[in-house]
Amino acid sequence: EQVSLLAQVVATQPSPTLDILSVEPFAGRVGVRHPDTRSLVKLVCHQPGTCLPFYAVVNWPEGTDVSVSSALGISSGANNAMAKSNAAVTMHVGTHATMVMDDDRSHIRVAVVSLESGSAGKKIHVASPDHKQIYLAEVVSANLLKRSY
């Protein structure tokens, strides 16, 4: 298979995890020589706010079934479950990090220590460095969490 991006893709972090939103036949596009061997794939970063949704064109070997489940080799529901169970730990227990809390009128940064390990997008418990305050926050990166208030 060959993958081509239709535009330059920019993300706020390097090598973000991507989710497939849809796979459509590339038929009906102007200048397509072999429409049955190409698919238009809509992708989005798994972590919200990391990148905007974007499209890629995938060239398949002739005779390939290009539905989402066959393209991935499994059902999309099973794919989501497998991705969650195999997600790499982004933040480990004891990591000193920064927790950000934002709303329309304020921006607060708090130094914290993680009390649990977690992957990007998961909520974990963190504490102030003196362990007097405990928070539940979402892991953004290896040393950044976010939370609303």
Image (cartoon, grey):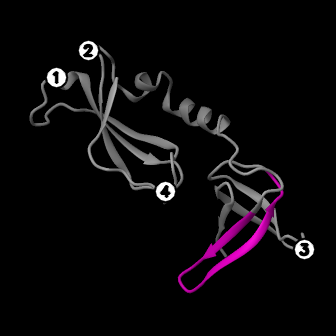
Q: Position of residue 34 (x, y in %)?
A: 16, 22
At x 44%, y 55%, the residue is: 51
- Identify the element where label 2 is drawn: loop
The residue labelled by disc 3 is 132
Q: Nearer the viewer, residue 22 or 40?
A: 40
Write down the residue under mark 1.
34
**What's the residue type where badge 1 is placed?**
His
Per the rendering, the mark at residue 62 is: 2
Horizontal side, residue 33 vs residue 44: left or right: left
Q: Secondary structure at mark 1?
A: loop
Label 3: which secondary element: loop
N-terminal-most mark, 4 or 1: 1
Look at the image and give the residue range highlighted in magenta. Answer: 97-116
Quadrant, the N terminus: top left
Q: Are marks 2 and 3 in contact (CB under 8 Å)?
A: no
- The crowd level at tag 3 (other Cα within 10 Å; few <14, some 14-19, many 20+) is few
Left or right of 12? Residue 93 is right
Instruction: Tell me the residue that label 4 is attached to.
Output: 50
Check disc 4 and give the amino acid type: Thr
